[in-house]
Structures are given as C-alpha cells and as structure tokens.
Image: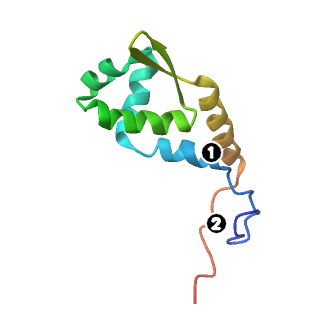
Amino acid sequence: MVANNVRGTPAVPVANSVLVARFHALSDPLRLQVINLLREQELCVCELCELLGVSQSKLSFHLKTLKEALLVQSRQEGRWIYYRLNPDQFKVLEEYLAQYRHFSPLATSHNGCN
C-alpha cells in the first residue's frame, strides 16, 4: 500500500504500525518528559512519578505506550520496575527521518485549487 500521490511527489510506502506507534508515543508532552529523564539514567517507576509529579496509574499508561512503541525497555528488580531508553529504536527513527533531508524544498508557486 502506498500513500496518495499529492502534488506530483513520489508515492511513499505507508509506514508500518510500529513506526506509527513510535510517532504517536512521541506526540505527548508527558511521554517526552519521560524520555528526557531516561536520557540520563535508568529510573524506577516511583522515581519517575516523583520527578514528574504524576500518579503511578497515569504514568503506567504512558509507559505502556512507550514500551509498545519499543522506545523504552523495562526490567524488574524485586518489586520495582526500572525503565531505560531503547537507543536502537531511536536510531531507526533518526534514519527514517534522515531520508527527508534529501527532498528538494517545496515549490513556492503552485497552480492553486480551483
């Protein structure tokens, strides 16, 4: 399946569900805060809750979204769950986005809609 060919641009394969999940995961401000905190170190849920000022139930929802997008990984130690970034998946996103640097700038003039 390919995306619609709009304005004569080349058709691009529709992103798979994992790629869509990754961009969705990055679209929420709280999830971005989680990612920024995990850039420095692995943190347990209780530390994340305290640093973000949110309840564990609210944070769990967002961590689940990040895990399903494969952007974070977790491990259990005793009764605590620790989270860390999954750098390989961020590299995949970076490589995907890098493809768009090669497109020519958008045309400044167009035929317009009638």
Where does the C terminus fall, quadrant-wise?
bottom right
Protein image colouring: rainbow
Horizontal side, residue 34 vs residue 105: left or right:
left
Tell me where residue 77 appears, x and y as whole percent. Answer: 45, 10
Residue most extreme to the bottom: 114
Front residue of 100 and 40: 40
Number of numbered discs: 2
Q: Is residue 53 left or right of residue 83?
A: left
Q: Mark 1 points at which residue?
A: 19
Q: x, y (%) of residue 99?
A: 70, 44
Query: Which image quadrant is residue 11 in?
Result: bottom right
Q: Residue at x 59, y 24 (%)?
A: 87
Q: Which residue is rendered at x = 63% and y = 81% of the image?
A: 111
Q: What element carries label 1?
A: helix
- Judge left or right: residue 43 versus residue 95: left
Of 75 and 26, which appears nearest the observer? Answer: 75
Q: Can residue 31 be seen in this view?
A: no
Q: What residue type is labelled 2?
A: Ala
Marks 2 and 1 close (CB-CB < 8 Å): no
Classify residue 62 by image quadrant. Answer: top left
Q: Earlier in the sequence, mark 2 or mark 1?
A: 1
Q: Which residue lies furthest to the top in this view?
A: 78
Q: In this view, does 41 lie above or below 55?
A: above
Can residue 99 be seen here? yes
On the image, numbered disc 2 is attached to which residue?
107
